[in-house]
Amino acid sequence: MNAAYERLVQHLDENEVKYRANSDTSSICADVQGDNCTFRLMALVDDDGELFQVFGYSPIRVPEGGRPAIAEAITRANYALKYGKFELDFNDGELRYQISQMLLDGELDDAIIGRAFGATMAMLDCYLPAFLSVIYGNELPQDAIRHVEQSEATQDDSEVE
């Protein structure tokens, strides 16, 4: 077990986050409640303690017929993202968000953990309604993503005022 993984576990314990740990893979898994649904978060530290990754899994599987449209929506969403990315497994329809952070000297601190978990949850909460509207509401990918991004820009502007 490396020091970065130990720090991750300590951080979760200190913040009373319920999780399942796998010390063999230096990973944890936690179910967290967002605004729109419950997400599964998986965080792991590579064997060398040089890379920290957080994956946020959507509670839905994209039906096969909707995968091309969701791939387009993901591409449109990812273009504007500054931190992390959405991914789609075309084989089984798994939709997730991923953030990676290179660690200097294997140092993982509370700020990195908090930002990675928070951003993953925020992005899933923000974009999941758009993905659902493409899959089940037949909304065009460009319209669904534009609505999300306009809504976020409006919220950002109102917070500044």
Image: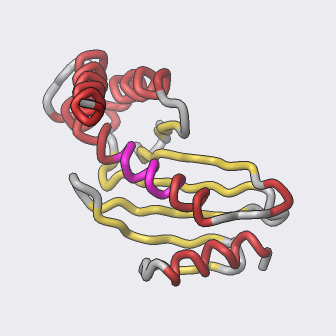
Q: Magenta span has 50?
A: no
Q: Residue at x 66, y 64 (%)?
A: 109
User: x, y (%) of residue 74?
Assistant: 42, 29
Q: Nearer the viewer, residue 72 or 108?
A: 108
Name the spot of residue 105 as percent of width and height, x first. 86, 60
- Quadrant position of the N terminus in the picture: bottom right
Residue at the spot 26% in from the left edge and 28% down from the top edge: 148
Residue drawn at x 67%, y 75% is 7
Q: Quadrant of residue 155?
A: top left
* Residue 129 position (above or below residue 121): above
Q: Residue furthest front?
A: 161
Q: Residue furthest left?
A: 137
**What range of the chain is rendered magenta?**
116-124
What secondary structure characterizes most of the magenta part? helix
Total marks in image = 0
Vertical placement of 149 versus 42: above or below?
above
Identify the image's colour scheme: rainbow, by chain, secondary structure or one colour.
secondary structure
15 versus 142 height, above or below: below
Can you give x and y, in whole percent of width and height, for residue 147 in the image? 22, 23
Left or right, residue 62 beside residue 16: left
Question: Percent from the top left, x then y, of residue 161?
Answer: 24, 30
Residue in view at x 39 percent, y 53 percent: 121
* In-front residue for pair 71/85: 85
Q: Quarter of the image holding residue 33?
A: bottom left
Along the horizontal axis of the image, is 19 left or right of 46?
Answer: left
Q: Is residue 45 left or right of residue 36?
A: right
To which quarter of the image does residue 21 belong? Answer: bottom right
Verify whether residue 122 appears in magenta. yes
